[in-house]
Every structure is written in C-alpha cells, then in structure tokens.
Image (tube, grey):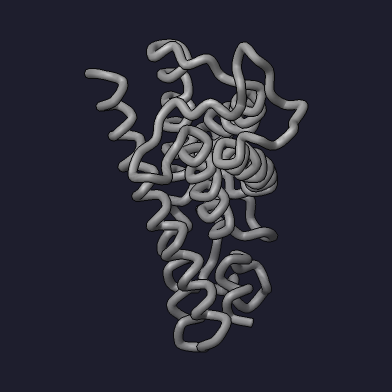
C-alpha cells in the first residue's frame, strides 16, 4: 500500500472522529436549552461510558501508529511541534490501555489534561501551516513546522489528524464521572442523586 492510500485511510478516520465530536458538541448545546435534550445527553453519556476508555485507547493507538508510519515508513521528518504532540499522545496509548483492562475510570484525571494540551498544540500547529509567514521560534530549517506533508479533503493535514484524535479522546473522557468510584463496575444507578454524573452530561442539563 502506498503512502497516499494510508493517508486516505487516516483521513477517513479523521472525518469519522470529526462527525462524532461535532455531534457530541451539538447535543451538548441543545441540552443547554432543552430539558428533553438534556435527558438525551445523559442517556447518550451513560450508554457510551462503559466503552469510553476502550474507544479512547483505540483513538490513541491509531494516532500513535499513524505518526510512527509517517516518520518511520514514509520518512516524513517530524518537526518540533510534532514531537510535542507526540509527547502528549504516546503516553495515553499505554495509560488508556491499562485503564481499559482495569476498567479504571480515574484515568480521566490523567488523560483529559493530556488531550487538552495536545489539542492546543495541534491547533497552533495547524494554523501555523495555514499562515506560514508567522514569526516563530518553534520552527527550524531541517524540519519546518509550516511544511504540509499531506492535504486531504481540502482541510485535513497531519496536525489536524492529531487534533481530531485529541478532541475525540477528550469528549470520551468527559463521559466518565469526575468524582465517585474509580472502577466503572462500581457505578450504581443512583449516581445522578449523589452528584457523581459525568460533567459532559450534567453541564448540558444546566
């Protein structure tokens, strides 16, 4: 398979992640304005919660594999900002994998900050690609941060792929309870009464 074929595959996964994140944000916005939609948001979060860590691990693992493919197989030289994003993504592959096996909901407190930090780096990198005339200390001549290695569907580059993975992981982590049992198996049906519901659902109901 060629690099272009792999890039198209990763681009299609990126589109799928984008649709999920946009749908989740749309549901959250609707829930802020309607009790009926707030109930739908709570139901969606509760349905997704048992699988959220597993899906987040898949997202991190695919993003990690994709970055290694581009650098080690396609021989795209990662820039400094690429390495910073890798520093945020790579540990999550291990952390989320262990948390998935142990069904450890406390992974949220570690994975969510990493996902947010990685997303901010990806946003900066992406806009730097779009506006390369900016003066920045993060670029060098050997591996410029402004170099666009791939461009799919008129908006997807490698930093945008990373951003999509970080955003997907963040949304999935927000379905986990911020407080309460560290193991998903310990959750009870009374968690709405004791204030331990996932932030993503409860914020939409306010």
Name the quadrant containing residue 47. Answer: bottom left
For the point 57% across and 50% down, which residue is it?
170
Q: Quadrant of the N terminus?
A: top left
Name the quadrant containing residue 154. Answer: top left
Name the quadrant containing residue 13. Answer: top left
Q: What percent of the width, then of the height, locates residue 190?
A: 57, 74
- Residue nearest the observer in this picture, 185 or 145: 145
- Say whether residue 108 is visible: yes
Q: Left or right: 91 with respect to 19?
A: right
- Residue nearest the observer in this picture, 59 or 163: 163
Q: Left or right: 59 with respect to 107?
A: left
Residue reaching furthest front?
133
Q: What percent of the width, then of the height, locates residue 155?
A: 42, 45
- Residue nearest the observer in this picture, 166 or 74: 74
With respect to residue 132, does 30 lie above or below?
below
Q: How many numbered markers are drawn? A: 0
Q: Quadrant of the C terminus?
A: bottom right
Q: What percent of the width, then of the height, locates residue 46?
A: 46, 66
With respect to residue 182, does 130 lie above or below?
above
Residue reaching furthest left?
1
For the point 46% across and 39% down, which residue is it?
161
For the point 41% across and 18% down, which residue is it?
69
Q: Left or right: 76 with respect to 176?
A: left
With respect to residue 148, does 105 lie above or below?
below
- Residue nearest the observer in this picture, 50 or 38: 38
- Say whether residue 107 is visible: no
Q: What percent of the width, then of the height, locates residue 75?
A: 44, 11
For the point 54% across and 37% down, which residue is it?
96
């Amino acid at each position: 398979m060629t690099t272009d074929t792999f890039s198209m595959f990763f681009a299609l996964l990126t589109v799928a992640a984008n649709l999920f994140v946009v749908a989740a944000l749309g549901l959250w916005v609707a829930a802020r304005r309607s009790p009926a939609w707030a109930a739908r948001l709570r139901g969606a979060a509760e349905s997704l919660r048992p699988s959220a860590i597993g899906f987040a691990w898949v997202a991190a693992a695919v993003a990690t594999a994709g970055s290694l493919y581009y650098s080690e197989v396609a021989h795209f030289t990662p820039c400094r900002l690429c390495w910073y994003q890798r520093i945020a993504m790579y540990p999550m592959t291990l952390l989320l994998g262990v948390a998935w096996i142990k069904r450890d909901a406390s992974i949220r407190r570690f994975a969510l900050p990493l996902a947010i930090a990685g997303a901010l780096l990806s946003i900066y990198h992406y806009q730097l690609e779009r506006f390369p005339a900016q003066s920045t200390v993060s670029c060098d001549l050997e591996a410029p941060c402004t170099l666009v290695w791939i461009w799919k569907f008129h908006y997807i580059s490698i930093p945008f792929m990373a951003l999509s993975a970080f955003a997907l992981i963040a949304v999935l982590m927000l379905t986990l309870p911020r407080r309460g049992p560290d193991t998903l198996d310990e959750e009870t049906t009374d968690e709405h009464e004791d204030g331990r519901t996932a932030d993503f659902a409860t914020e939409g109901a306010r």
